[in-house]
Image (cartoon, rainbow, N blue to C red):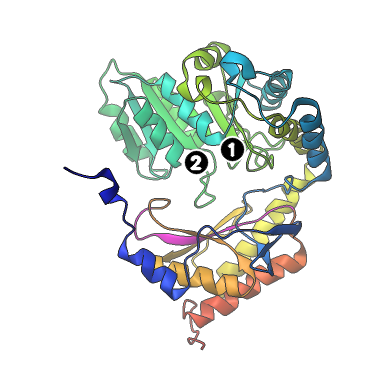
Amino acid sequence: MADVFARCRMPDTYDLVRDLGVYPYYRAVRERPGGGEVVIDGRVLVQAGSNDYLGLSGDERVKRAATAAVRRLGTGSGGSRLSNGSLALHEELEERLAAFLRRPAVMVTSAGYLANLSLAALMAPGDAVLGDRLVHACLIDAARLGGVRLRRYRHNDLEHLERLLEATAPDAGRLIITEGMFSTSGALCDLPGLAKLARAYGARVVMDSAHDAGLLGEDGRGAAEHHGLEDAVDVQTLTFSKALGTIGGAVAGPREVIAYLRHYARPMVFTAALSPPCAAAALAALEIVAAEPERRARVRAAAARVGGELAALGYAVVPSDRPVVAVPVGDDLLCFRLWRELFDEGVFTTAMIAPGVPAGQALIRVSLTAAHTGRQLDRIGAAFAVAGRRLGLLPDSRRLP
């Protein structure tokens, strides 16, 4: 008889990277003494891996709102939204998000992952669901939950997408799913091209704005606003754990679609409602996003500076003003070694390997925030210079001891 626990074995490389001291995951942060810094193992490091893009998780106004909600409503919701966990606070947040995003209706969920999983209720066997090769795991899981095969087109490759659309059954429902700004690279989706294909083939477009809502566009509504094509996106999802600095998620779209999801999306119906402090924090953060566009400007300036500096050093970085700077490495072990060198130089980044990125395309992800100071940005650039030379990654550099 087979034992299901028999498959619970880590690969040999797991022990290798731990023995080498380059294992980059589950590093416990003890304190966050100030914007852009964390304390790990008694050391103060520059936090260059956080998606708290606007630095709002530590904003005093956001913390006060969360604290007040705990005092008034407690720490938990006590049930799902459908049963007994709905709060007036949730409804206020939904109304404010709908106004901010300029969408007819919004459904707030307990996490961004659950917002995207809720999309499964829009899918049925026989539908053609087509997703960019780099979409997040939660969108892949939504297709699995919806009982459909996700056909994945090469990243931002519209010719490949069109071939897949042409191959779909004439009577199939068609759904194109994409991220607005891709979490692994900071690249934007080609929304103008997607919109044109969606119109031609009668497809609906879902955009995951986890990494672009609050950041892109004149008013911070995301990649669709940036492109001037908000009407081309039928459903928009987002998470509160990035620009809004807390936990939670939302689905925004037509009223009839949101009403349907409220009653048929399993992640919504069977999950405890968003906690009061997180809902209150998101509300406060949303006000700051609308009132303080200079935060977005600071993030863009920091990203442009760091991306430009890393490219000048010789890293294969594509400079932009978007807050995710992807530093390609390729080999997993080399990626872990670079992560460790940066860590030792006082910079805490994110090492990404498969399945987070395609196999053989490991990278270091640097995330910039509005909280980073000029001194901290200096430390990031200096750490990459030292680490890259030490590992022989930079052109015309000799390996340092």
Q: Pointer 2: residues within 10 angstroms few (<14), some, or many (20+)?
A: many
Specify whether 375 is left or right of 274: right
* Residue under the point 53% across and 57% down: 26
In the rendered structure, which disc, 1 or 2, sits on the residue that comes first in sequence? 2
Q: Pointer 1: residues within 10 angstroms few (<14), some, or many (20+)?
A: many
Segment colored magenta: 358-370
Rendered-image quadrant of the N terminus = top left
Q: Is residue 312 magenta?
A: no
The one of 297 and 61 positioned closer to us in this rendering: 61
Image marks 1 and 2: residues in contact by CB distance under 8 Å = yes
Q: Is residue 187 visible?
A: yes
* Residue under the point 31% across and 60% down: 11
Q: Is residue 331 visible?
A: no
* Residue under the point 48% across and 86% down: 399
Specify whether 16 is left or right of 100: left
Q: Quadrant of residue 213?
A: top right
Secondary element at tag 1: helix
Give coordinates of residue 62: x percent, y percent. 78, 39
On the image, numbered disc 1 is attached to which residue?
223
Give coordinates of residue 383: x percent, y percent. 62, 74
The one of 17 and 297 positioned closer to us in this rendering: 17
In the image, is residue 210 above or below residue 340? Answer: above
Label 2 sits on what residue type? Cys
* Residue under the point 36% across and 23% down: 174
Label 1 sits on what residue type? Ala
Per the rendering, the mark at residue 189 is 2
